[in-house]
Amino acid sequence: MSINDEVKNVKLSIYLPEETRARFKSACALHRKSMNEILVDFIDDFLKQNEPPVKTKDKGAK
């Protein structure tokens, strides 16, 4: 993606126990990162490890 490409962010909601949210929020604060930053990083890492590889076209094939 180039600098001129714009990324459209969308909202994702989840349900989890109040205590889990509070613990997660505290752990994120210890790292001086927002919950959003941590979750986006986690999702990116998860996708890198779990998405099937993208097939590229063979330049020599017709």
Image (tube, rainbow, N blue to C red):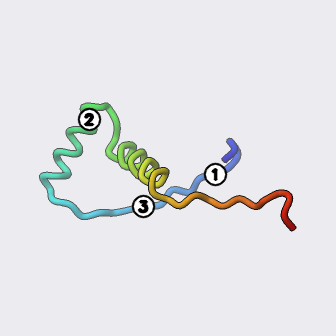
Locate residue 46 relative to residue 23 in the image: left or right: right
Chain-order first, disc 3 or disc 2: 3
Disc 1 residue crowd, few under 14, some 14–19, many 20+, Cα 10 Å: few
| Quadrant in the picture for the C terminus | bottom right
3D distance between C-alphas at marks 3 and 2: 21 Å
Disc 2 residue crowd, few under 14, some 14–19, many 20+, Cα 10 Å: few
Give percent across and percent down for residue 45.
Answer: 44, 47
Q: At 12% from the left edge and 52% from the top edge, which residue is drawn?
A: 19
Residue, disc 3: 11
Q: Amino acid at mark 2?
A: Ala
Residue, disc 2: 29
Q: At 76% from the left edge and 61% from the top edge, which residue is drawn?
A: 57
In what element is the residue under mark 2? helix
In what element is the residue under mark 3? loop
Give percent across and percent down for residue 10.
Answer: 47, 60
Residue 6 circle label: 1
**Location of residue 12 (image quadrant):** bottom left
Q: Residue furthest bottom?
A: 62
